[in-house]
Image (cartoon, helix red, strand yellow):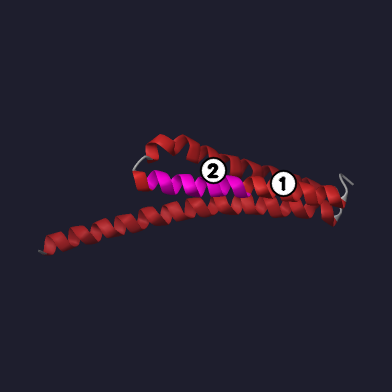
Amino acid sequence: MWFSSSTAIILGVSIGVILFVCYIFWVVLSTYAMKKGKYQKYKKVIYSLIFIVTGIGITTLTLFIVAITTGQPYHVWYPLMMVGSFGCMWTIGIFIMNKARKKFITIGELNKMNIDDLS
């Protein structure tokens, strides 16, 4: 056994809080940068936060797989699975929403061009 159940609770909560704070900071900073038109200024910080969340998620998912294959008890692998899945889920969601946003912007621009052509 890698650690006790009380250590697993502390580990899961602390890593989860770190992910949550990074995600909230990313949302606030991205919204501020987009509203003020300063996206290029904060682009490195925004992408760094995304990579931090992704790195924590991938690392904990890897530890989860190792814990499952070595036969660790439930209280060892479950926090790793939850934190890793949330870290990767947020990152995947961010990139899916970005692709969807670009697609809808393109559709909107094409519609504007069609309306301009008709008038």
**Total number of numbered discs in the rendering:** 2
Foreground mark, 1 or 2?
Answer: 1
Q: Position of residue 71 (x, y in %)?
A: 86, 51
Which residue does the image show at 78% across and 45% down from the upper left?
66
Which residue does the image show at 36% across and 56% down from the upper left?
103
Q: Does the magenta stretch include residue 16?
A: no
Circle 2 sits on which residue? 50
Label 1, residues with CA under 10 Å away: few <14, some 14-19, many ≥20: few
SS class, disc 1: helix
Label 2, residues with CA under 10 Å away: few <14, some 14-19, many ≥20: many
Circle 1 sits on which residue? 14
Q: Are marks 1 and 2 in contact (CB under 8 Å)?
A: no
Amino acid at dot 1: Ser
User: Residue 69 has which mark?
Assistant: none
Which residue does the image show at 87% across and 45% down from the upper left?
3
Left/right of residue 117 with respect to residue 2 in the rendered view: left
Magenta: main secondary structure: helix
Left/right of residue 26 with respect to residue 117 in the rendered view: right
Question: Which comes before the other along the chain, label 1 or label 2?
Answer: 1
SS class, disc 2: helix
Quarter residue 62 falls in:
top right
Amino acid at dot 2: Ile
Pick the quarter of the image with the C terminus. Answer: bottom left
Q: Position of residue 23 (x, y in %)?
A: 56, 48
**Which stretch appears magenta?**
20-34
In the depicted structure, whether residue 87 falls above or below residue 111: above
User: Separation of disc 1 and disc 2 at Cα?
Assistant: 18 Å
Q: Can residue 72 be seen in this view?
A: no
Q: Is residue 107 visible?
A: yes
Q: Position of residue 45 (x, y in %)?
A: 49, 37
Which residue does the image show at 49% across and 40% down from the upper left?
46
